[in-house]
Image: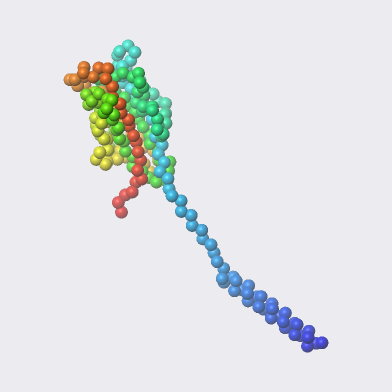
Amino acid sequence: MKKKIMALAVALVLCCFALAIGVSYGLYDKTVSIPTHLVAGSLKATLERVKLTTYNLGSDGNFSTVVDDAVKDFSTETQDSIFGITAGTTAAPGSTFTAEMRITNGGDVAFYYYLETFYNAVVSDQTFASMLQLTVSSEDVQREVRIGEGLTSDGEAIGSVNVGESEIFTVTLKFLDDPNNNKVENKFVLFDLCVHAVQKIDAA
């Protein structure tokens, strides 16, 4: 009877020892998971007009200056003009429209921004178009072009904006004095402006 008890006791000891070895081995064999999530960054530009200064004909036919400080969002495609020009707006030599714009980087990457003109030569009077001058200016650049010419034909950006920052630039439209001004009475010009942003990648 005693032999059987001792044999059982030894068996229990061996089982416990084997269990202890198994637990110890499991600690050394532990696997740690390290998840990696890569999310593509976003380019998000917000474009607002923060000020519009118009020097144009008043209802009495005289030039006057009007300032509009209301902030207007131009971040999405719209039929509104940054210069406040509507279908009933008339101009004369000397008329000037100056829009102060703010571009903000709300994405994850820095970007360059450009301004381009799209001129509809089919329906527009080309003589009148030659008398309209656009000027774009920022901290980095100031250039003057005529309607129908690309403001960024040389590939130079107006400026660049880092993440979480904003930059102010100004676009001015002016009706120039010209010997042929009388030839464009009651004529019109149709053109669009486009601001686009491109991810900023500096050379290594």
Instruction: Inspect this view and state whether residue 177 appears.
Output: yes
Q: Nearer the viewer, residue 187 or 167?
A: 187
Left or right, 41 with reference to 16: left
Left or right, 19 with reference to 62: right
- Using the rendered view, name the quadrant where residue 103 is placed: top left
Find the residue positioned furthest to the front.
Answer: 122
Query: By what rule are the colours in the image chosen?
Result: rainbow
Find the residue positioned furthest to the left.
Answer: 179
Q: Residue at x 25, y 17 (%)?
A: 185
The C terminus lies in quadrant: bottom left
Left or right, 42 with reference to 113: right
- Using the rendered view, name the quadrant where residue 21 is placed: bottom right
Q: Residue at x 36, y 22 (%)?
A: 86
Q: Is residue 161 above or below residue 86?
A: below
Q: Position of residue 171 (x, y in %)?
A: 31, 30
Q: Position of residue 87 (x, y in %)?
A: 35, 21
The N terminus lies in quadrant: bottom right
Q: Residue at x 31, y 36 (%)?
A: 115
Instruction: Inspect this view and state whether residue 131 appears.
Output: no
Q: Is residue 40 above or below residue 153?
A: below
User: How many marks can you see?
Assistant: 0
Q: Position of residue 129 (x, y in %)?
A: 24, 26
Q: Position of residue 112 (x, y in %)?
A: 33, 42
Q: Residue at x 36, y 45 (%)?
A: 199
